[in-house]
Amino acid sequence: MEYIAHSDKERVQTLIAHLEGTARLAEGFASRFGKGDWGYCCGLLHDIGKYSDDFQKKIRENSTAMVDHATAGAKVCLQKGGFYGFLSYCIAGHHAGLPDTGGTQDTGSAPTLKGRMRKRIPDFSAYQKEIQIPEIKSVPFDQQKVRNVDFSLSVLIRMLYSCLVDADFLDTENFMKNGRVERISGESIEVLLERLKHHIEDWLKNEDIDTVNGRRTEILRSCLEGGTAEKGIFRLTVPTGGGKTIASLAFALSHGVTQHLERVIYVIPYTSIIEQNADVFRRILGGENVLENHCNVDYESSEELRSMQFASENWDKPVVVTTNVQFFESLFASKSSRCRKLHNIANSVIIFDEAQMLPLDYMKPCTAMMEELVQNYGCSLLLCTATQPALTSFFQEGANIRELCPRMEEQFRFFERVKFRNIGNVTEEELQAKLSEEIQSLCIVNTRKRAQSLYQGLKGDGVYHLSTTMYPKHRRRILETIRERLQNGEKCVVISTSLVEAGVDLDFQAVYRQLAGIDSMIQAAGRCNREGKRSADESSVYLFQFEERDKSPGQRQQLDVAKNLLAEGWDVSDLNCTEEYFKRLYHARGTSLDKKRIMEAFSKRIFRFAEVGKEFHLIQEQTKTILVKREEEAKQLLWQIQNGGYTKSVMRRVQQYCIQVYDEDFKKLYDAGMVRSVSEDMEDFYELVNEGRYSDEMGLDLGIESGMALFS
């Protein structure tokens, strides 16, 4: 009898061909981290449940009947014991997702691994005629070098799972498309380094360290040379204006070539910075080599971008630019679609841009994962920012974190462009009076409601409001107007939330910043005298507090630590102040640095993969999405959603017209009848029906009071 794995009605793929093809691919992927034998075994056994008569009948009759073919290989691995038992998670979950271990009370209907072992499945013993279980020779890792054996095992299982599901997808895709696959992996790191060197060759001739460009070149040259170092953890602590984007790329490509690494992964907190950086990288390295992977990117709507869509599934490009959310949530995910890319993180240079934005609620599991990638998966990390978080204590003793910025403290003195001035407590009226006397100034406050209130008392010619109460396309138009006025020397006073603190290239004469974390206040200062056209003494960053406290979700500890440091007389611009701030913040946070107790989910050989996959979400605030249909394209997209249904492509385009609203504000809008659901099938997605609540000046007005519907 010929056993079949797949059929397209005209052709069949034999089961042995699929198993061997998947095994060879998985072996190649897992070889990157020294576990090729594990990958081969996993691939060879993953579908042996298809040797059952029930499955062969199903595929020959093209039936839709459900036949469990994943439990069989998991049972064989568990029965064999030893290291094979770890493969059982991968095989059992190669369609449904990595299961939790479960307990002795689980029945055969439970989705856990122990439940699956009690499940009755069709006889698959015919596999023994064609398949011999391969030997696993390598050990998981050196137990003397890891701090938490169970956590390290959980990462190994997830990495092997990634190898298996990607290999399974690719082998199946190759058969179904009869070898006509449109995947393009991009050029080698060696080629990209030569492109970068050509781009910067004239810069490197600058030896004058008394100029801004000379200093940038000094930092760039240091990063290129630093790339030849052994793999490990690095820091690039560069002041605003120091050219860290190109310098970090230079390090990454140089390091990738000398250490034989396969790709560069940029992990960035904001999509606005991602889009800017990705554009820079594409211009230097070629668009086919740079994958931008986050929620705002749409590769599906164009045939020309099909290869990018394929690459986004498994990150098979030499340069990947992604978000903190995408990166860390994938590493703690349990579903095949999210985990498929993970094996391609191995043997990479991983750059954490704006490293101070690593999520506090998940700091311990995130840093444990970062350390795991360095120790067992051949990665190097670069922490890149002007405000370095104090992460040394999170890594094992003896972690050698190397700084790439030459003469770091001297660079910060050279690039000093502002003076911080603490003006203490103010009322809104006092702040408005100060701002009314400014020509070109930026005022950043901590909440959207405060920004709207402050703007309302100040609005007039040359006064602008910027906030996430405006949909992205609207914000971009306002930003263009602001840039033009700044460049033309016209009056321009901007009231904003923290959204302008990163990835927004604006240059004001003065900045007013409500008390926030030290890192946020330094980032705000980067919008003042950005081009260095004035002296530091002429460029003030005024720190202030309101007499009454704002509701700043999740910011209370940051505010309190910063307030104490200022009261003690610390200089915000001092590098030691930043380090002290983070040390105190992490100490104050205590156990909440692992808020969901993720690390406890992997202990005593009990693994809670599915549970962690559901719990690990970096963005915790509950929000609703509101579509503002003021523009014709927004109306057309709404019509498409309501009449043509939900598609990823349409939803990515519609995000340009959407606002995220916290539940408290949403409830008031909903109760007042100002929003309604877009579709019964789409939870948490609404349209604004009272368009009078949205204005060109302020976006969505959040100053609604409870009970307004009674009078409308």
Image: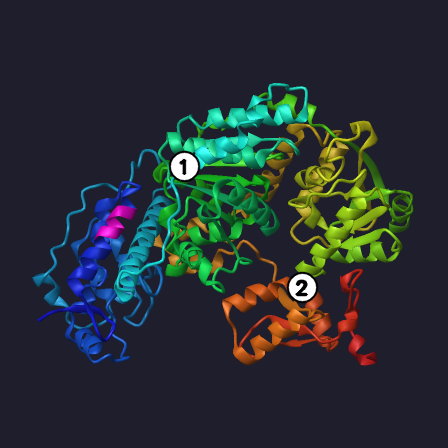
Q: Is residue 176 left or right of residue 544?
A: left
Magenta stretch bounds: 24-29
Mark 2: which amino acid? Val
Amino acid on which the number 1 mark rests in the picture: Val
Instruction: Decide: few, some or many residues near mark 1? Use Cα within 10 Å; few <14, some 14-19, many ≥20.
Output: few
Q: How many marks?
A: 2
Image height of 620 relative to 264, above or below: below
Which residue, given by chain and number where applicable, does mark 2 sit on? 661
Q: Nearer the viewer, mark 2 or mark 1?
A: 1
- Horizontally, residue 385 falls left or right of residue 468, namely left
Could you say which disc has been placed on residue 191 in the image?
1
Residue 534's spot in the image, x, y percent?
A: 79, 30
Which residue does the image show at 31% across and 72% down from the upper left? Answer: 109
Where residue 94 appears, x then y in whole percent? 31, 61
Task: Give x and y (percent) for residue 276.
Answer: 59, 46
Q: Secondary structure at mark 2?
A: strand
Q: In the image, is residue 479 above or below residue 660?
A: above
Camera-nearest residue between 303 and 23: 303
User: Left or right: 126 with respect to 701?
Assistant: left
